[in-house]
Image (cartoon, helix red, strand yellow):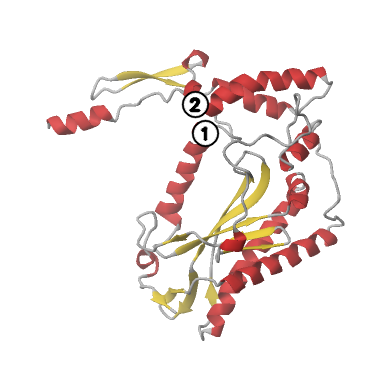
Amino acid sequence: MVATLNQLLSKRYQRHHPENNLVYRTVQTYWPLFVQEQKRVGKAFPHFIHDEFEDFLKCGIPENGFIRTYCYQCQHSGLVAFSCKRRGFCPSCCAKRMNSEAAHLVDTVLPEIPYRQWVLSFPFKLRYLMACNQKLTNRALKIFLQTISSFQKKRAKKSGLGPSQTGAVQFIQRFGSALNLNIHSHALLPDGVFVETNYGYVFCRQSEPTHEEIIELATKIQNKVLKCIQQMGLNEDFQPSFDEEGLGQLASLSVANKSGFGERAGMGIRRFGAKRIEVDLEGNDSYSANVGGFSLNARVWIAGSDKKTRTVDQIHGKGTHSL
């Protein structure tokens, strides 16, 4: 009884003090300087950017609003500061949303089968173009999933299996390791296919992709995306503009990893602890390929026995088989 009580007491809510976080202190220090610099040179930026940063600085700070909680069982009372609930870069609010979505996928969507994560990033010339053209971004990511799914189905057909189906969960990420503008995709696909039988669908696992196959897939994705750009009347050197004033220049500097203001405005950002912000390891990684700037990676693999997935038996009443 005492152990249980101590365990409950140890799980009481503890404020995470965002004001001590490095990201918070960086924004708190340099955001006002950035605003002043933009005003000094007579440039404006969208209101949604201003609101994102200002609300982030208020997130989790009790002085900006809070709610008092009370538990009638343990009679514990505490204060919970309001959250910004933004979708940009707030670590706290983004983590809450991410965990909620992950729990939904684990509990109600993903069966207990092996999965492989496929990551696709694009050439620097296309990143700005995709950042301001949502239609192109959607088509490029659709090509990505269709290419991988078609590859899996063709392998199944060559193995003598009947009609098969696959699926995917895809998330778009708009920033790189240095928080620079870098639209790329993380997709989770079954490491195999679902084959239709008289008893329903049965999962058949496939062998991991070879380096040559990954290069072939990256080449197909490159050709299809470039063809799509031509069909849309665009090209890699086309420099469109954002609808919001001032956003285009900021996005262009971010893609190029350059400083936006201050003494080093327009110059490459300073790097500490590494010679390069983004290190391309495709040449030394058999699970990666880079074809004309289209970087495809398939290294991460999740075992079917992982507790973060549900069993295919619960869905179809059948086990899994390996090719």
The image quarter in which residue 90 lies: top right
Residue 236: x %, y % from top left: 82, 54
Q: Amino acid at mark 1?
A: Pro
Q: Which residue is denoted by mark 1 in the rendering?
A: 91
Marking on residue 21: 2
Choose the circle earlier in sequence order: 1 or 2: 2
The image quarter in which residue 6 lies: top left
User: Measuring 66% from the left and 25% from the top, which residue is drawn there?
Assistant: 51
Question: Depth check: 24 or 112 in front?
Answer: 24
Marking on residue 228: none
Q: Element type at marker 2?
A: loop
Residue projecting furthest to the top? 63
Residue projecting furthest to the left? 1
Q: Amino acid at mark 2?
A: Asn
Bin the neighbour count of mark 1 within 10 Å (Cα to Cα): few under 14, some 14-19, many 20 and up.
Answer: some
Residue 113: x %, y % from top left: 41, 65
User: Measuring 18% from the left and 29% from the top, which residue is drawn there?
Assistant: 5
